Image (spheres, rainbow, N blue to C red):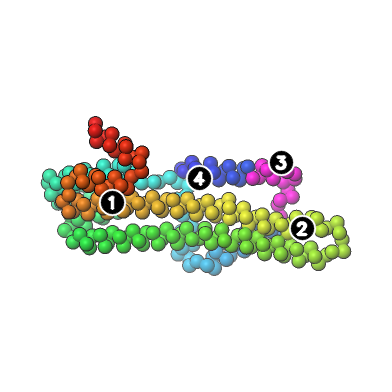
Amino acid sequence: MDLTTIIGLLMAWILVIGGMAAGGNLGAYLDFPSVLITGGGTIGAVIMAYPINILRSVVGTVKSAFIANEPDLLAMVQTIVSFAEKARREGLLALEADVAELSDEFLKKSIQLVVDGTDPELVKAILDTEIGILEDRHSANKAIFDTTAELAPAYGMIGTLIGLIAMLGDLEDVSKLGPGMAVALITTMYGSMIANMIAIPISKKLATRSSKEIVSMELMVEGILAIQAGENPRIVEEKLKVFLPPALRSRLNKKGEE
């Protein structure tokens, strides 16, 4: 599990709801018609905006925001360098025995293309296309939450306008103006909470996850093409170091000195 997602979500909701409770009656913030207008309207509009195949992936997309499954770039560099050393000693065909042991499907496919003698330019084209398609799929999944963040405050405002219209239609009873105004504003609050406490944080987390996965795939492409070109393993390592953050580069250097 991704602790930052869970801790952040709990902090946001607990502290906001705690502040609401400390400021008065918590029940004053609960209004079922406002939930219908804001929540129902937002969900309906999102369903209308996207095809069913993208909407079906929402559950899996949300899971990826809560489950930490980030690529181990350091281990990936070490694996690719070891493949470079083996290919240098025994030839590219010697890597075929290692393909079945790999858990990463993209790396497995990359090595298999090289072992099969595929032209380097074609290898790069195939792998770049796969990266591009993955990036498009991630963007489509993220867009659902971006749209939710845009629509929820708008439906909150619609609910507020509905409440104001209903309130202004009964101006004869002045005592109802205060409670009526409070109920009208609740929908705006609900819309802001959906956007800023659910949709936007998940969207940002998905963008971070996607960026890291794309970097790991680009690292693999660079390494595999260097192996196919028969480059020295040390040169391969230096090429791949540029994909690592400074802390991981230091760890890699220390291991190389041991």
In the picture, the disc for residue 5 is 4
Task: Give the residue drawn at x 47%, y 50%.
Answer: 205
95 is higher (above) or lower (below) than 154: above
Q: State whether the magenta stretch is mostly helix, strand or loop.
A: helix
Place of residue 251 in the rendered image (x, y in percent of width and height, measured from the top left): 31, 36
Ranked by sequence position, the earlier of labels 1 and 2 is 2
102 is higher (above) or lower (below) than 152: above
Say which amino acid is labelled 4. Answer: Thr
**Residue sitting at the far left:** 90
Depth check, mark 1 against mark 4: the one in front is 1
Q: Which residue is mark 3?
A: 22
Say which amino acid is labelled 2. Answer: Met
Q: Which residue is mark 1?
A: 220
Disc 1/disc 3 C-alpha distance (Å): 53 Å
* Marks 1,3: beta carbons within 8 A: no
Task: Give the residue drawn at x 18%, y 61%.
Answer: 119
Ranked by sequence position, the earlier of labels 1 and 3 is 3
Q: Which residue is mark 2?
A: 181
Ranked by sequence position, the earlier of labels 3 and 4 is 4
Disc 2/disc 4 C-alpha distance (Å): 35 Å
Ranked by sequence position, the earlier of labels 3 and 2 is 3
Disc 1/disc 4 C-alpha distance (Å): 28 Å
Q: Is residue 224 left or right of residue 64?
A: left
In the picture, the disc for residue 87 is none
Say which amino acid is labelled 1. Answer: Met
Q: Quadrant of residue 195?
A: bottom right
Disc 3/disc 4 C-alpha distance (Å): 25 Å
Give the SS element for disc 2: helix
